[in-house]
Amino acid sequence: MKNYQFKTKKTIIYTIKTTSKLNKDIWLQTTLTPILDNGEVKKLIALDTDITEIKEAEEEIKIQKEKLEAERLKVNEKNRKLWELSIAIHKEKENMEKITKILEDKNRNIQDSITYAKKIQEAILPKISYIKDVLPDSFVLFKPRDIVSGDFYWFTDRYKFCMIAAADCTGHGVPGAFMSMIGNNLLNNIINENKIYKPADILNELDKNIIASLNQDISSSSKDGMDIALCSIELRIQKLTFAGANRPLLIVRKEDHAVEVIKGDQFPIGGHYSAKKIFNTDQFGGAKNKKFTIKRLQMVLLEIKNLPMHRQKEALDRLIENWKGKDEQIDDILMIGIRL
């Protein structure tokens, strides 16, 4: 380096890492300045400066830069992953929107089908005007839980007598509606086609036909069927004949202070009979979520017995709605009232 300086005659600055007298690592910056005489280098002056703090600061800056670079790379990686996640979420959202659209279309189609099924069910049910032509002092309170119902009422006029039934099929909604259509068709066949008119015989025949239609035997798992109250009324002689399967006939006489209950047989139409079956669990509600019991119904019927039949229907409907409150109806409701 000295030879180089003698040739160039320029000041040279260099740094070295060395050890101090106290055996500590230090950085020195040496400045070599040539002294010229007639253009020739006569001697060199060396000036040493301790730049350890500067070097340590530079080293710290370098370390911080490396850390910042590492953090920048991490942030970039996170941003990349977030971007990929954003794209995935966007695609998932698009997929969900497509699925939602498909489900909405299918649900609309199902609702349209059920609404059309309601029209079919309403067409099968006897017209209220037809019933009132024969039984003018009567009402039918029919409150399906869903669009279509598992309950149905049935009526026929045979000149000398008429027959009316209230049936509660297994289930509600679409499954119950299918059962109601089967029951309605079977009653038409048994009474109008086969000319069977005794209520008890009709129920026996209905039971056999339901079991046959649904292929119910000892090994079958099907327990579908219905509960039913069936009355034959001879208006000319004021005679009523009743048969029931898990459904009673309630008689409210003007002069009495109690409701006479004629219980039907304690087994259903169709299905498998079991002593452990629980019936008449149609609805719960009210302020204490209590069941609307047959006893409570009897009390109400006694209170409204002197009202015209259409007013009785309104009173019963209003009572049910007020008792139910904001709770959803959990089953179909069907009641038929006739004054003789």
Image (cartoon, rainbow, N blue to C red):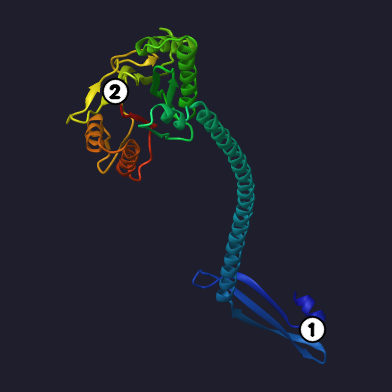
Location of the C terminus (image quadrant): top left
Which mark is on residue 249?
2
Residue 157 drawn at (x, y percent): 44, 20
Bin the neighbour count of mark 2 within 10 Å (Cα to Cα): few under 14, some 14-19, many 20 and up: some
For badge 1, the amino acid type reads Lys
Cα distance, mark 2 to mark 1?
A: 132 Å
- Quarter of image, res 17: bottom right
Identify the secondary structure beneath mark 1.
loop
For badge 2, the amino acid type reads Leu
Q: Which residue is mark 1?
A: 9
Which mark is on residue 244?
none
Residue 51 drawn at (x, y percent): 59, 77
User: Which residue is found at the position 36% from the left and 20% from the top?
Assistant: 227
Residue 108 drawn at (x, y percent): 58, 39
* Residue 84 against residue 154 in the figure, above or below: below
- Which sits earlier in the primary sequence, circle 2 or circle 1? 1
User: Which residue is found at the position 39% from the left and 18% from the top?
Assistant: 161
For marks 2 and 1, give the one nearer the viewer.
2
Outermost top residue: 218
- Quarter of image, res 32: bottom right
Residue 63 drawn at (x, y percent): 58, 65
User: Which residue is found at the position 33% from the left and 33% from the top?
Assistant: 283
- Left or right of 241, for residue 197: right
> Is 218 or 224 nearer to us in this picture?
224
- Left or right of 318, for residue 60: right
- Left or right of 182, for residue 82: right
- Quarter of image, res 247: top left
